[in-house]
Image (tube, rainbow, N blue to C red):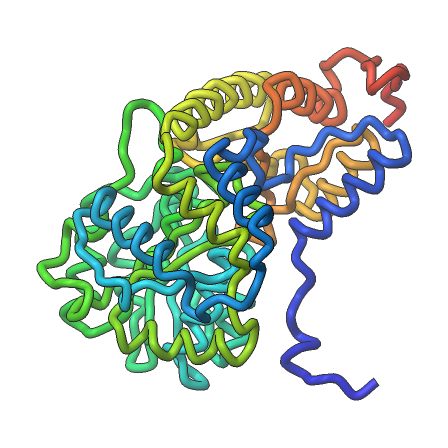
């Protein structure tokens, strides 16, 4: 079959593939525990559900402006000012079908063929693929294995004449690492001096633990939105538990937003008015649910760290945000993909191979499910890997016996 070489080179999303596999196994009655998901289990805010219902009840479900409804763009501008101290006009905002589409359209806007984008590892699996899909070259810069945080000198030392952007995600998926303010400040100021775009994927910025706060990148620039090289990406998916609503946005100079709008109009045309109404209600409605989610996730984070500490040879850097951790399983002598397959087959636990995130010999484990699932999932992993663990374990309504 004569397919595009570029399209054929794009790898299948491992997280979406594993989500589908887990659901298929569960449908077959297999007692799977899913520690691979990136989806908080809290309900969408009541305000969002009611706004979507009211929009549907009105029956006027039509095309919307390609850049997003004016009222949601205003709400996103208010959110930006309230949370970042950054004044933005509606012309500085574009609404897209999730932060993933927002980032893709942004890269399509910024990159010419061969332009480089610096991506610290560990990274979200889609970053390198999206850079390649839009004609760019991802330049991966390893972080410290002791912290999962990149060094400024390594990031800035990777800059070349072809560098168009640096892409940061803090708190970080997959590690949960929270980049320090000093690092953020140095990168922001460097990008402004060198006229390099700094893309801050900030969708986890409120999911932070231990009384900490995510550093605000806007605090380190003396420029307004129009003059700045800093672009902020956000969404309602993670902090409001609204992954299925698929609404994200970018805050950027008007000229960047205008081109993104052209791209969006030529591809998806517009966003769903129902979903935008829900997102607007979430941004403008009661915010107590965000704090409740943070409290739940912090409890689960503590539980998974305590459980992992019982597996000899496993090392894990304490995550200070998101709902992921990235334990090092290299002591078990398996590459991460082989280890994931082994744990799924033997213990019915879904994990995500670290190689997909630029962290071979690690597994990404999510703790956004129930605390009981988190604890049992890690207990099954220990049973599968540690010969000193009990020989028998209950998996669902059956007793499994270690015979390997």
Residue 71 visible at all: yes
| Picture quarter with the C terminus | top right
Relative to 374, does residue 119 appear above or below in the rendering?
below
Outermost residue toward the left? 222
Q: Position of residue 277 (x, y in %)?
A: 47, 49
Kindly identify the residue that appears in the image at 64 percent across and 39 percent down.
Answer: 36
Relative to 116, does residue 149 appear above or below in the rendering?
above
- Who is closer to the viewer here, 108 or 8? 108
- Who is closer to the viewer here, 71 or 156? 71
- Who is closer to the viewer here, 30 or 347? 30
Q: Quadrant of residue 62?
A: bottom right
Q: Position of residue 276 (x, y in %)?
A: 47, 53
348 horizontally vs 117: left or right: right
Q: How many marks?
A: 0
Q: Quadrant of residue 192?
A: bottom left
Residue 124 visible at all: no
| Picture quarter with the N terminus | bottom right
Kindly identify the residue that appears in the image at 50 percent across and 31 percent down.
Answer: 46
Relative to 63, does residue 356 appear above or below in the rendering?
above
Q: Position of residue 312 (x, y in %)?
A: 60, 22
Outermost residue toward the bottom? 2
Q: Position of residue 177 (x, y in %)?
A: 39, 39
- Who is closer to the viewer here, 356 or 113? 113
26 horizontally vs 76: left or right: right
Kindly identify the residue that appears in the image at 19 percent across and 64 percent down.
Answer: 225
Kindly identify the residue that appears in the image at 27 percent across and 34 percent down.
Answer: 213
Relative to 366, does residue 271 appear above or below in the rendering?
below
């Amino acid at each position: 079959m004569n397919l595009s070489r570029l399209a054929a080179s794009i790898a299948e999303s491992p997280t979406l593939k594993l989500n589908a596999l887990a659901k298929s196994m569960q449908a077959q009655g297999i007692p799977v525990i899913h520690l691979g998901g990136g989806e908080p289990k809290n309900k969408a805010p009541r305000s969002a559900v009611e706004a979507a219902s009211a929009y549907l009840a009105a029956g006027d479900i039509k095309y919307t402006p390609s850049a997003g409804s004016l009222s949601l763009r205003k709400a996103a501008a208010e959110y930006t000012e309230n949370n970042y101290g950054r004044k933005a006009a509606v012309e500085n905002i574009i609404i897209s079908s999730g932060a993933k589409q927002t980032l893709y359209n942004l890269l399509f806007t910024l990159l010419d063929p061969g332009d480089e984008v610096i991506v610290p590892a560990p990274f979200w699996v889609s970053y390198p693929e999206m850079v390649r899909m839009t004609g760019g070259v991802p330049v991966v810069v390893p972080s410290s294995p002791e912290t999962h945080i990149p060094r400024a000198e390594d990031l800035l030392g990777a800059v070349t004449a072809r560098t168009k952007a640096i892409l940061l995600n803090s708190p970080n998926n997959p590690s949960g690492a929270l980049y320090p303010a000093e690092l953020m400040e140095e990168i922001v100021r460097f990008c402004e001096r060198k006229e390099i775009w700094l893309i801050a994927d900030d969708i986890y910025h409120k999911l932070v633990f231990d009384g900490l706060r995510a550093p605000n990148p806007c605090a380190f620039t003396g420029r307004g939105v129009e003059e700045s090289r800093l672009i902020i990406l956000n969404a309602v998916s993670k902090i409001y538990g609204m992954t299925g609503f698929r609404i994200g946005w970018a805050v950027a100079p008007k000229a960047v937003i205008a081109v993104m709008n052209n791209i969006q109009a030529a591809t998806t045309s517009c966003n769903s008015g129902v979903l935008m109404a829900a997102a607007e209600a979430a941004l403008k409605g009661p915010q107590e649910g965000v704090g409740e989610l943070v409290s739940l996730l912090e409890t689960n984070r503590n539980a998974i760290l305590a459980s992992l500490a019982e597996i000899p040879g496993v090392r894990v850097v304490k995550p200070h945000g998101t709902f992921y951790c990235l334990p090092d399983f290299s002591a078990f002598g398996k590459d991460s993909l082989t280890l994931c397959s082994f744990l799924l087959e033997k213990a019915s636990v879904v994990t995500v191979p670290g190689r997909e995130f630029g962290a071979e010999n690690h597994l990404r484990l999510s703790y956004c499910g129930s605390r009981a699932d988190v604890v049992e999932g890690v207990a099954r992993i220990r049973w599968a890997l540690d010969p000193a663990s009990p020989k028998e374990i209950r998996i669902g309504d059956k007793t499994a016996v270690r015979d390997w």
